[in-house]
């Protein structure tokens, strides 16, 4: 890219309906260099006027005369589709769109999504499979590819997508996606057997069975109203915890529980594809009463294989963290998974936990908030309110607003050469999606009303 390209004064883009777009737009961009935002505005106006033929030639003219913008390669195939262009031309535009993208898993996934939107299901499915080859640990290609595989009735692709989901998909809501993957695999297997393709059906069955294997599972259980935290330090140095629910070492904290509901009093760590070595499970008594000051740590190695081993260990809780050392000799992962911007965002979305009133009141700022809350409650009414207001830990929670990015974001940095002739641009796209939204009540710490003076909330 030339940094010293002479530019004409900005002029609004205009055209005459009698002009031939295939001649007008190449000549326009050959003689002028309008601002990028003016080009985008003109393309938008042409699209609103349903001048799709003009849109196609305007974008092509800009690309031809070195005035291309990244969005043009994505808009052009859709404009050609609306303009009724031949299928061969649309396919060439799609190829150009894919070629300009970096050969990354995220780029391939995004290109596949555009292909699927244009109705090219087979091409999109092939791109999803290529994305999984670049980074096998990313669950998004498998999730999106499964829908296309089922729609196309492609048994081999169903086996690929279902096994990928069962092995690598441990984000929020994974249980339902695992059930969908298993169901799709069973349906594809049944279809193959009904069609007399027994060998392919057995191959698919073996593939799904292989995906159910788990190198290591840790499950910490207890009874009582308190909360225990499980943190796992993996052999390569990665740490799986409430703050980092998914790691590049393959570990995932799939459940973070708290009391007093017995069904919720457990923490679970799963490493389906783990690295051989020594794991350190750190057990921290966060707050609250634990019955008997005891917990149970269940360790499952090589689940789903003939060498499956299950061990249960009683854990005596003390003021200090308890650390359990365990070894994994036959881990199937050989190297760390790749890290991307999307992975950083998804790994920070840890399971939702209820905050403890005691834990919240530990800091000095929380104690000040408790005193202010108590004074405000005592001013409201009678003796019962005043009695409840001075209870230890009677803390009111204030709402905190956080902006979460969703969709496509891109940052770019530019470096100009010393002779001011060239510009080197480094682009960093990020594709994010909000998958779950939880509702909660801030009265009585999210539980049923009891008439007391304590209040709390779920963050």
Image (tube, rainbow, N blue to C red):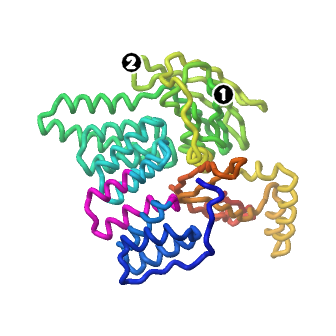
Q: Quadrant of residue 202?
A: top left
How many neighbours does mark 1 have within 10 angstroms: few (below 14), some (14-19), or many (20 or more)?
few
Q: Quadrant of the C terminus?
A: bottom right
- The CA span between labels 2 and 1 is 29 Å
Residue at label 1? 237
Q: Quadrant of residue 411?
A: bottom right
**Residue at figure coordinates x 53%, y 21% from the top left:** 311
Q: Which mark is residue 360?
A: none
On the picture, is 122 further left or further right than 128?
A: left
Residue at label 2? 306
Question: Could you say where residue 139 lies in the image, as x and y percent from the top left?
Answer: 46, 42
Q: Nearer the viewer, residue 387 or 151?
A: 151
On the picture, is 297 further left or further right than 20?
A: right
69 inside magenta stretch: yes
On the picture, is 378 further left or further right than 223?
A: right
Q: Nearer the viewer, residue 8 or 230?
A: 8
> Closer to us: mark 2 or mark 1?
1
Q: Classify 86 as above or below 289.
A: below
**Residue at figure coordinates x 48%, y 80% from the top left:** 14
Q: Which residues are magenta?
A: 66-95
């Amino acid at each position: 890219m030339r940094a010293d390209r002479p530019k004409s004064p900005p002029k609004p883009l205009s055209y005459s309906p009698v002009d031939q777009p295939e001649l007008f737009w190449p000549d326009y961009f050959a003689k002028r260099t309008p601002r990028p935002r003016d080009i985008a505005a003109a393309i938008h106006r042409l699209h609103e006027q349903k001048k799709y033929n003009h849109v196609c030639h305007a974008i092509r003219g800009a690309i031809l005369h070195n005035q291309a913008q990244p969005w043009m390669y994505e808009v052009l195939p859709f404009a050609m589709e609306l303009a009724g262009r031949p299928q061969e031309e649309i396919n060439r535009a799609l190829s150009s769109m894919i070629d300009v993208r970096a050969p990354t898993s995220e780029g391939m996934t995004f290109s596949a999504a555009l292909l699927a939107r244009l109705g090219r299901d087979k091409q999109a499915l092939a791109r999803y499979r290529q994305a999984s080859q670049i980074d096998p640990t990313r669950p998004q290609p498998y999730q999106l590819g499964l829908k296309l595989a089922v729609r196309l009735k492609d048994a081999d692709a169903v086996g690929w997508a279902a096994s990928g989901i069962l092995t690598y998909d441990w984000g929020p809501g994974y249980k339902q996606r695992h059930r969908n993957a298993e169901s799709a695999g069973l349906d594809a297997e049944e279809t193959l057997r009904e069609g007399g393709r027994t060998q392919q059906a057995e191959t698919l069955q073996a593939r799904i069975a292989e995906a159910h294997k788990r190198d290591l599972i840790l499950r910490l259980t207890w009874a009582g109203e308190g909360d225990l935290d499980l943190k796992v330090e993996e052999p390569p140095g990665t740490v799986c915890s409430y703050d980092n629910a998914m790691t590049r070492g393959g570990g995932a904290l799939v459940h973070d529980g708290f009391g007093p509901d017995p069904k919720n009093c457990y923490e679970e760590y799963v490493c389906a594809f783990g690295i051989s070595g020594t794991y350190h499970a750190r057990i921290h008594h966060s707050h609250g009463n634990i019955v008997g000051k005891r917990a149970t740590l269940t360790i499952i190695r090589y689940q789903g294989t003939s060498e499956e081993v299950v061990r249960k260990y009683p854990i005596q809780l003390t003021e200090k963290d308890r650390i359990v050392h365990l070894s994994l000799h036959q881990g199937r992962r050989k190297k760390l998974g790749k890290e991307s911007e999307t992975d950083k965002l998804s790994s920070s979305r840890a399971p939702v936990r209820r905050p403890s009133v005691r834990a919240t009141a530990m800091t000095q700022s929380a104690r000040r908030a408790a005193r202010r809350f108590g004074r405000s409650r005592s001013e409201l009414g009678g003796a019962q309110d005043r009695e409840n207001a001075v209870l230890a830990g009677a803390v009111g929670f204030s709402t905190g607003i956080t902006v979460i990015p969703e969709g496509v974001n891109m940052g770019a940095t530019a470096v100009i050469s010393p002779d001011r002739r060239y510009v080197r641009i480094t682009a960093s796209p990020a594709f994010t999606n909000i998958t779950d939204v939880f509702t909660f009540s801030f009265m009585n710490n999210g539980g049923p009303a009891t008439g007391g003076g304590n209040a709390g909330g779920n963050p």
